[in-house]
Image: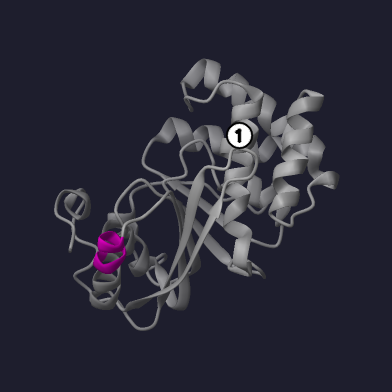
Amino acid sequence: MTPEAGALLVEGATALDLDVSSHLDSFASLLKLLQEGNARLNLTALRTENDIVIKHFVDSLSCLRGGFLDGNLRVLDLGTGAGFPSLPLAILRPELYIVPLDSTRKKIDYVRATAQTLALGNVHPLVGRAETLGHHPAHRETYDRVVVRAVAALPVLAELALPLLRPGGLLVAQKGPISSAELEAGRRAAALLGGVLGEIQTFELPVLHDPRTLICIRKTGPTPSKYPRREGVPVKHPLF
């Protein structure tokens, strides 16, 4: 990691009230492994060190805002891709038990190998889809938190995540700007699935000042057994 990229990481983390100074070697190793893996597997469109540091590392750490991930929690990272936010969270919060989930095996193989190289014993990668996992007794209603860097609409995320959360658990969704219509659709979907729309935080991604929204949905009761619907249906036919 160049001195400039390291300084950007410290600056971005500091803006989030986080101290990464004792973890810079781990983040430097993660950056190197991502660049090497990307050359073989095309894991991410981001290529420069500065882009990776801000748009992957710092952006991943932004879900620590609000204290939603404080404590010894069982966390599922829905659609982790190349391991974000899982790997940065695992470096900074070793007390978390993190399950990065993705349907693409090559990505999970990379995340597993990277976690082993970095000695992140709190990372337990899994190949699969939320539609299937949500009906599996080893996973349904067993997680304290589900985190997702979200491109799907909020009702879709609610249907995929809430079946995996225990009552009292939280979906923590990282999104860009969000409309009032999507928030209302998410609120209605959450109510149907045994949840309630909770805290909404708007902020800017440090350094770049891109708008971000952190949205929480709290699981308040059991999810009806028919949810989530079969593979692909939540995305093609959202509840609202």
Give neighbour class at mark 1: few <14, some 14-19, many 20+ (Cα, 10 Å): some
Main SS, magenta residues: helix
Point 46% across, 38% down: residue: 81
Quadrant of the drawing holding the N terminus: top right
In this rendering, the answer to whether 68 lies above or below 29 is: below
Colouring mode (rainbow / by chain / secondary structure / one colour): one colour
In this rendering, the answer to whether 122 lies above or below 200 is: above
Q: Which quadrant of the figure has residue 11?
A: top right
- Locate residue 111 relative to residue 93 in the image: left or right: left
Q: Position of residue 147 (x, y in %)?
A: 48, 57
In this rendering, the answer to whether 198 lies above or below 7 is: below
Residue range corresponding to the magenta coloring: 180-185
**Amino acid type at image mark 1:** Ala
Q: Which quadrant of the figure has residue 184?
A: bottom left
Taking the image as drawn, is residue 93 in sight? yes
Point 36% across, 45% down: residue: 151
- Locate residue 117 relative to residue 110 in the image: left or right: right
Residue 9 belongs to magenta span: no
Quadrant of the drawing holding the C terminus: bottom left
Q: Position of residue 21 (x, y in %)?
A: 84, 45
Point 67% across, 39% down: residue: 116
User: Which residue extends farthest right?
Assistant: 22
What secondary structure is found at the residue carrying circle 1? helix
Residue linked to disc 1? 113
Q: How many marks?
A: 1
For the residue pair 10 and 195, the one nearer the viewer reads as 10
Q: Position of residue 173 (x, y in %)?
A: 44, 58
For the residue pair 95 and 2, the one nearer the viewer reads as 2
Q: Position of residue 90 (x, y in %)?
A: 66, 51
